[in-house]
Amino acid sequence: IEVSDVQRYMQELIEFMDTRHPQALKLLREKKDLTDDVRTALDQALEDFKSVFKPTAAKA
């Protein structure tokens, strides 16, 4: 992503995780470690977010 989109990406990712993948965050809080199941949950959440995040169009 472009540097200009980083702030928005972070904000939207946090909202996305809170609303669509709260179980991944809960699992991370409970385990306090990047176990295989935590990694799997986070990887899935990030893949899902990647499919919905729309970066700002680059200027020509």
Image (spheres, rainbow, N blue to C red):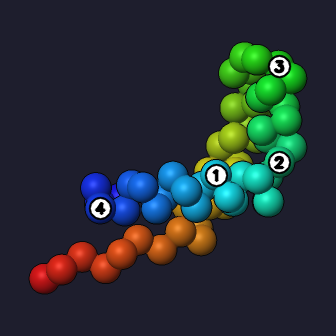
Q: Secondary structure at mark 3?
A: helix
Mark nearer the N terminus (2 vs 1):
1
Q: Amino acid at mark 4?
A: Ser
In the rendered structure, the answer to whether residue 13 lies left or right of residue 24 reads: left
Q: Residue at x 72, y 52 (%)?
A: 17
Residue that label 2 marks: 22
- In the figure, is residue 17 to the left or right of 54? right
* Sequence-wise first label, 2 or 4: 4
Location of residue 16 in the rendering, given as x and y in whole percent from the top left corner: 69, 59
Residue 12 location in percent, x, y? 58, 61
The residue under the point 84% across, 31% down is 27
Q: Which residue is mark 4?
A: 4
In the rendered structure, which disc, 3 or 1, sits on the residue that comes first in sequence?
1
Q: CA distance from mark 2 to mark 3?
A: 14 Å
Which quadrant holds residue 28? top right
| Residue that carries the numbered disc 1 in the rendered image | 14
Disc 1 secondary structure class:
helix
